[in-house]
Structure formats: C-alpha cells, structure tokens
Amino acid sequence: MQLRAEALPQHLAKSLAKVYTIHGDEPLLAQEAADLIRATAKRQGFTERQVFTVQGAYFDWAPVLAAAQAMSLFADRQFIEIRIPTGKPGKDGSEALQRYCEQAPDDVLTLVTLPRLDKTQLSSAWFTALDQTGVTLRVEPVERQRLPVWLAQRLKAQGQQVAEGANGQQALAFFADRVEGNLLAAHQELQKLALLYPAGEISLEQIQAAVLDVARFDVFKLSEAVLSGQVARMLRMLDGLAAEGEAAVLVHWTVAEDIRALARIRAALDAGRPLPLALREARVWGAKEKLMERVASRLDAADCARLVGAAQTVDGIAKGLRHPDWPLDAWAALRRLALMLTETAAGKTGIALQA
C-alpha cells in the first residue's frame, strides 16, 4: 500500500503493518519516517531489534529469513530492519524478499530502507511483494516552490511563525533561498531559530541574522531553473555550483543538452511531426516535457542555431580555448550562455539571442 510521508503519523496511530518500506533520496524525511516507525514499534512491544545491511551481490540472506521465523528469547516481539543502500538486492535477494513477505509472521515488524528507485526497480517482483505485504513510503526532496510552505509548517510545529502578508512571505522566501536543496541543514537552521528566539512571531531581520547560507544545488535543478525562465534563481545556482567546486564542463554539458534537445524538437515540429513524437525523439520525458514545449514554441530555426553555436563556443572555453567575443573565464561564459537560454524561456527573446 502506498502512503504519503505526511500521512504516516495518522496511519501509525491506528494500526501497524507487517512491513514498512521507505525509499527515496531525501535523507531527512527518510530518517524522520524511520524514527517514527521505530518509536511506535517500541511502544507496541516490538523491542527485540535486529539490523541487516545488504552489502554486495553475495550477501547471505539465510540469517534474514531465519530471524523472521525464530522465536524471541525474551518473549518480546521482533523488529527487523533490512537496509539495502544500493537499492539492488540481486537475484538471490529478490527471491529472498519475496519469500520473506510470504512468510512474514504477525509478531515481527519489518522496516526496509532503500535509496531512490528507478522505474524498473519499482516494478520488480521483490518491490511489488514488499508493497503488497505492507506500507510503502516514497520520500522525495521538497521542491523550491513548496519549500516556503514546508518551512512555515516546521516553524509552526516548534511554536513559531512569520508575520502575515507580504513581510512573512518575504521572510520565508529568504529562508528558502538559503536552504534550498539541503533539508538536513534546513532542519538544523530551524532548530537554531527555536534556540535563539522564543515562541511566537519571528521577523525577517531575525531570520537574516540567524540562518546560514547552506543551499546545495545540482545540475538537474539548474536545468529546471533555466527552462522555467527563473533568471535570479539560475544565477544564484550557478554561483553556488561554482563555489562548491562543480566542474564547469559538467555544468556546460547540462545546459548544452537542453539546447540540443530544443533544437531537435524545433526541427521536428518544423518538419510537421506532432509534439509528443518530437519530445520522444528528443528523449524528453517527465517534468521537462511542459518546460521544453513552452520554450520550443518561442524559438525558430535561426534562434536554435544561435544557441547551438553559443553552446559550442562555451564548450571550447570550458576546455581552455579562447574566443574574441566571449569571456575568457569558463564560469563567466557559462553565465552568459545560461542567461541567453533563461531569458529566452522567460520570453525575453529580443535580449537573449543578441549574444
């Protein structure tokens, strides 16, 4: 059974399933969900705990299967954790997990923790068995647009809140900019606010004074900011990636891939192909589809040619070559290229494509 992470407390207050499976790439939310399950299990009498960490393809699953069937030495109910850091239990593990789910007794509660899983893993026989036997929780990062609401909820939980209206929204937006992409650090900054200031309303000035800039960015979020036309966010992310030591070549590859995809989509549309086929041929799926569709509609073949040419120029600069019309510094050139595409996405084509 699939369950949203925020619905877990209400679920645990009613009943306990035999098996809980947590998967996703947000460490804070995964840790909080696991801690809540452990605490509830302990209160319900599942006090004898065993932990198995699956390491490599040659992990011995026999002790795991035996533990679930063994009688407790102290007449306590058992709590078994199975940690699979790679998300790949292997052939033997797949069979063992399916057998484990078939034989799961009522006096054993099992927690399985996994990283983010791909479509193949989510449709595998072993994951299906876990899902059908118990409760599955998928924990994902809080997206930037949802982050202010998430922060407000966390502040409320510790007895604090920002002012109503524009001032409060500005405070939350500032907070979100400082912690984007790093929920563990966001949690620490929230705890700091609880220690520094009493319960009640906290101001923008207090947040500015207390909250460190602990935002963490990745090239995939940069792509989202560029295609969404978010100029300020894109520039902040580029500066962050540079400060974190990310390779300019990798960042350029991400921006250039988006440009090449847009050029392929535009060429396919100009050739009379329907949009869904053009997106599929350009290998664009998921959340990027709508973003690419919107940006491609604002470009013509000449625009795409200029963007592709600019991407090729910056590729050379990132690899040490010079160009008379472009900055010598790779990151400065990347900012110019990303700005061209971001302003195009924002509808400022007159400015963007003059570079």
Image (cartoon, helix red, strand yellow):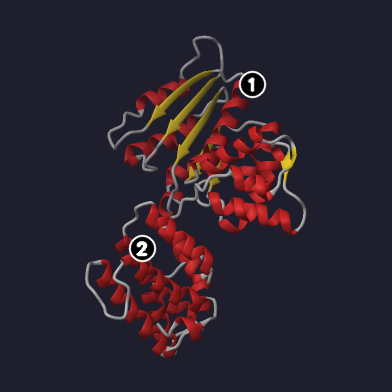
Residue pointed to by mark 1? 43
- Badge 2 amino acid: Val
User: Is 165 on the left or on the right of 61, as rendered?
Assistant: right
Q: Reading the chain from its start, which is encountered first: label 1 or label 2? A: 1
In the image shown, does 249 or 8 lie closer to the viewer?
249
Q: Position of residue 252 (x, y in %)?
A: 34, 67
> Which mark's residue is nearer the viewer, 1 or 2?
2
- Residue 44 seen: no
State whether residue 71 is above or below residue 118.
above
State whether residue 215 is above or below residue 67.
below
Residue pointed to by mark 2? 251
Q: Quadrant of residue 354?
A: bottom left
State whether residue 246 is above or below residue 342.
above
Q: Is mark 2 on a helix, strand or loop?
A: helix
State whether residue 77 is above or below residue 329.
above
Q: Residue at x 42, y 71 (%)?
A: 338
Task: Give the quarter of the figure containing the C terminus.
Answer: bottom left
